[in-house]
Image (tube, coloured by chain):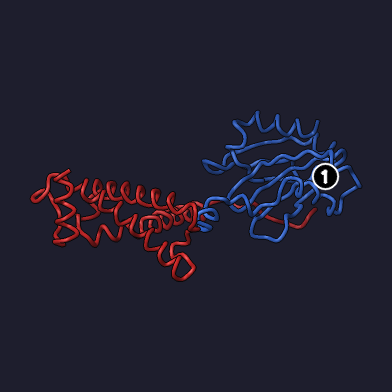
Amino acid sequence: MDNLLSGLSLMFFELQIVNQNNNENPVLVFSIACSIVGAIAVLLDLTFYVLRGRSLFDLNHGKLTVVFLIAWSFGALVIGWVGQLASIFVVSVSATVLVGFTWPLIITKYLKTKADEEYASEPEQEIAEEE
Amino acid sequence: MAFYSQLFDKSSDFRSESEIKNLVKKSKNYKNEDVANSKILNFFNTSKQRSYLVTTDEMVYCIVDDSRKNEAKINWSMGKELFASQSITLKDKTVRTGLVNFGEKHKNWLYTKSIFNNEDNMKNSISKLLS
């Protein structure tokens, strides 16, 4: 726990890159940091919704806001963890903010690209006038 | 959230089976058959198109429903007895799609392999449709 807190402190308040040299669990630090930023993203969206009456992330705020908060945060944690396993991100504030704020957009864009690729190769039935 | 539902719910763009059945009334070969007792077989299914065989007491209609078009289209129709006398032959096209010949006149119609487990299953489905 102390290790996690010191890693988060190092990253968020001293703006340093966390790695094996200054922390024993950089992957855990990054995953948790992503989930915190994910929660902050939803809370900021809620604030914007309250102030301006619309959601930047297209979320239907209300009773479901808590669900969005948990889901977004959990998703960011998993994507952060996977990103670390794949060595895509360094453990920095900017990478954390990128994952925390945009992971659903990245995932849906990726899925849409994959779906479009698949749909593009689908054969099509010829439509003709009735014989 | 609307974006998510649109991304995954592709079926919402297609006409319902009852709408497809009712379309036979627009056929130039429609002989006032009872559409309520008609049978329907979906044999081709992609993200953009579905193809059906609809049988009434007298006729067989082949209908293509394209989600990008305003309405489904009858491609051909023939008497039920004549259709029953035609040989149904199948051949491969891609991993997911095959070609079916409904006799000599209506050749190379795409069908989705996953709808039918094997060739016999498809022929049985057509036999049930005609019974």
Eyeballing the image, is B45 above or below B7?
A: above
Eyeballing the image, is B33 above or below B122?
A: below
Q: Secondary structure at mark 1?
A: strand
Q: Mark 1 highlights which residue?
A: B78
Eyeballing the image, is B127 above or below B100?
A: above
| Of residues A72 and B23, the one drawn nearer to the viewer in this rendering | A72
Residue at 75% x, 48% y is B20
Q: Position of residue B54 (x, y in %)?
A: 77, 42
Eyeballing the image, is A95 above or below B113?
A: below
Chain for disc number 1: B
Q: Position of residue A51 (x, y in %)?
A: 44, 70
Residue at 76% x, 50% y is B19
Chain letter matching colour red: A
Side of B20 where B27 appears, left or right? right
Q: Position of residue A22 (x, y in %)?
A: 9, 51
| Of residues B64 and A33, the one drawn nearer to the viewer in this rendering | A33
Chain letter matching colour blue: B
Side of B4 where B61 appears, left or right? right
Instruction: Check the picture and name the quadrant holding the C terminus of chain B.
Output: top right
Q: Amino acid at mark 1?
A: Met
Q: Residues within 10 Å of mark 1 (few under 14, many from 20)?
A: some
Q: Position of residue B96 (x, y in %)?
A: 54, 41
Residue at 18% x, 47% y is A4
Residue B45 in which image quadrant = top right
